[in-house]
Image (tube, grey):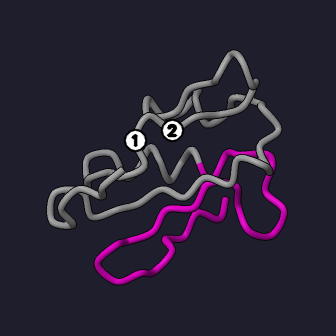
Amino acid sequence: MTAPDIEEKPYKIIFEGKGCIGSGKCAEVSQNWGMNLETGLAQAGSHYIDESELEHNIEAARVCPARNGDGVITVVDRRTGEELDTEP
């Protein structure tokens, strides 16, 4: 998959699926997230997002109960390479 233009989609979602416990909390707060019925794990609709999609994806990362130090869902600003604060 080729990444979209950075100006069009300046944020990237990194999902550590092996840490997902399948609670579905992310899907409750963000329309970008759903549950894969075969695996029982969360699934992002898109891994590249724009400003209008940012807040609910940050909220998905915040509500994830599988947080152990580093979160299972991380949002990165592609322009700077910085991880955005998703601490609850």
Task: Report the side of 2 relative to 24 (left or right).
Answer: left
Helix, strand, or loop for circle 2? strand
Split into 4 quadrants, where in the image is the C terminus? bottom right
Task: Report the side of 73 relative to 7 (left or right).
Answer: right
Q: Nearer the viewer, residue 20 or 84?
A: 20
Residue at 41% x, 81% y: name it. 81
The extreme top residue here reads 37
Residue at 64% x, 23% y: name it. 36
Image quarter of residue 68: bottom right
* Marks 1,2: beta carbons within 8 A: yes
Q: Is residue 52 above or below residue 24?
A: below
Question: Can you give x and y, in whole percent of width and height, for residue 6 in the image?
Answer: 21, 66
Question: In the rendered structure, which amino acid carries the disc numbered 2?
Answer: Ala
**Numbered tag placed on residue 44 in the rendering:** 2
Q: Is 64 covered by the magenta stretch?
A: yes
Residue at 57% x, 61% y: name it. 74
Distance, label 1 to label 2, CA atoms, is 5 Å
Question: What segment carries the magenta color?
Answer: 61-88
Q: Nearer the viewer, residue 42 or 53?
A: 42
- The main secondary structure of the magenta stretch is loop
The extreme front residue here reads 1
**Numbered tag placed on residue 66 in the rendering:** none
Task: Report the side of 74 relative to 69 (left or right).
Answer: left
Image quarter of residue 73: bottom right
Question: In the rendered structure, which amino acid carries the disc numbered 1?
Answer: Ser
Q: Is 86 covered by the magenta stretch?
A: yes
Q: Is residue 51 above or below residue 84?
A: above
**Numbered tag placed on residue 46 in the rendering:** 1
Disc 2 crowd, CA 10 A, few/some/many (<14, 14-19, 20+): many
Helix, strand, or loop for circle 1? loop
